Amino acid sequence: MAILLEYLFNGALLGVIYALVAVGFTLFFGVLDVIKFSHGDVLTLGAYSGLAAFVSLELLGLDLPVVSLIFVLVVAMLVTGLAGIAIGQFFVVPMRGSPAFNILLMTLMIGTAIHECIRLFVPGGANPKAFPTLLPRTPIEIGGAYIRLDSLLLLVLGIGVIVVTNWMVRHTKLGLAIRAVAQDGDTAQIMGIPFRRVVLATFALGSMLAGVAGVMNGLYYSEINFNVGVLLGVIGFSSAVVGGLGSIWGAIIGGFSFAALQTVWVLFFPEMSGYRDVFAFTTIIVLMTIWPTGIIAERYSERV
Amino acid sequence: MSGHLTTDQIIAAYGSARVLSGVSINAKPGAITSILGANGAGKTSLIRAILGLLPTSKGRIELDGEILSDLSPHARVARGLGCVPEGRKVFPKMTVEENLRVGAYLSNDKDLVEGRLQKVYQTFPRLNERKQQFAGTMSGGEQAMVSIGRALMSEPRVLLIDEPSLGLSPALVRESFALIRDINRSGVSILLVEQNVQQTLAIADYGYVISQGTVVAQGTSEELQNDPEMKKAYFGIR
Ligand SMILES: Nc1ncnc2c1ncn2[C@@H]1O[C@H](COP(=O)(O)OP(=O)(O)O)[C@@H](O)[C@H]1O
Ligand SMILES: [Mg+2]
């Protein structure tokens, strides 16, 4: 029972990280009908900028746990947000109207360039980097199970970020504009909505979520490497597709489902835990052939 | 009086297929100006060109003396254009009220937006009853109300209306024409694209007949009634 709770908890934490990535894919697809394959590598960029922020704090001799965490998160979100805007402004928006394949390939190349630059320019970039411990690791007992305090805080943080994002999209003027552009770009423009600015704001928002996910992932595993975004990108994209690509709730459910599949595998075959991704992807491939439009078909979901 | 929209010899194409070959119209302040023509004549393209959704390669579009031609669509709307697009184009997965609020996107004054919202609800009590319903689940007539109400939320000086009566029952068509006249009487200039020739001529002050992307006839409603070009263009008789 206790062990089950621990698995459930770790699964939930992974689910939140995947959901953060998946919501980005869904937002980008919503406003511009594009798949931005550089998304995972933007996450990596976020993780490394967070690390760089921490290192500079250390150099300055500052060591305040909570402040450090906030600073690391803010820097990661700033860098990923700007990266999202730049990729949108200089590559994706100008390519609007060209075949989807071209945009897909282009963003894939941008992503590869990003993580290769990290590998080459970061000192020792080809090797994994230790990610700092910014939260207390005190074990807490919940119903006989031991859960690390930092993991609990990360879960709360991730859920908080998702709730705030969803609230923004539902209840703010920017959110209204994002939904209008997602549902009908031309009509949105003749309502006075500045199309390009809203698209870029959406790119910034989605990329900032990847920044948070990158830092969370680093904190959870205590290490990052230049390749971390590749797998997380594919997982986030799969989660978004499972959720129907276009609905925020779908992406969130997709993210948690992927983590659930991994967790179930590890729970039943602990000595073959390395195969958890193979199992999760295989299951999703099967699900996709059964429900080609996603588990939550778009007609039941609210587009972005 | 403001709300004077003119196009001067505008030319536009979809790729290499030209749809507007030098169209000049003059929608006078406070008037209802109609654009008539058969299917595929280029009426919707003209509206899209005025709004900036279809780029023009030549010619000039002016609103109250200000040149709009180089502005993006949202900037043109900010200058006072409003639109009820062809097919109504409500945002299907937004509620009625959200649709209306998108219409007031450019206004940051909360009280002003609330005031306009109440005004639209007064005009369309039906929308007030259904404000939390998704617009996509409403009937054609109700969606027409949403689309018109949404356009009114920006209090435009010139309202472009593209085939509002498309797919509506005869009773609703009559109602929509009466409504357009009321909006016009409240001081909004109107550029009206319609297929319903008789009812359009009945409310319009002036009209243009378009065929294959050019103006082939123009005049007051009486003049157009008897214009042979008009019948030719309209019914495609050559
Ligand atoms: N998006 C488009 N791409 C290519 N051609 C178009 C497009 N929209 C309209 N057309 C063509 O432009 C011409 C004028 O269309 P339109 O302006 O919609 O006419 P109307 O509104 O008078 O029925 C038609 O021949 C139509 O086929
Ligand atoms: Mg038309």
Image (spheres, coloured by chain):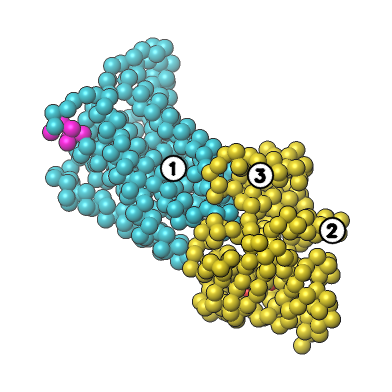
x, y (%) of residue B146? Answer: 70, 49
- Residue underneath mark 3: B116
In the rendered structure, the residue with mark 2 lies on which chain? B
Shown colour of chain A: cyan
Q: Which residue lies under the disc numbered 1? A: A22
Would you say the magenta stretch is mainly helix, strand or loop? Answer: helix
Which chain letter goes with mark 3?
Answer: B
Q: Residue furthest bottom?
A: B238
Chain under callout 1: A
Q: Which circle, 2 or 1, is nearer the viewer?
A: 2
| Mark closer to the observer (2, 3) | 3
Name which residue lies at 61% across and 51% down: B154
**Residue that label 2 marks:** B174
Q: Colour of chain B?
A: yellow
x and y percent of residue A72 in the render? Answer: 27, 34
Q: Amino acid at mark 2?
A: Arg
Residue type for callout 1: Ala
Regarding residue A291, the answer to whether it shows in the image is no
The answer to whether B94 appears left or right of A243 in the picture is right
How many other residues sit within 10 Å of disc 3, few (<14), some (14-19) or many (≥20)? Answer: some
Q: Position of residue B67 (x, y in %)?
A: 52, 69
Residue A209 in the figure: left or right of residue B20: left
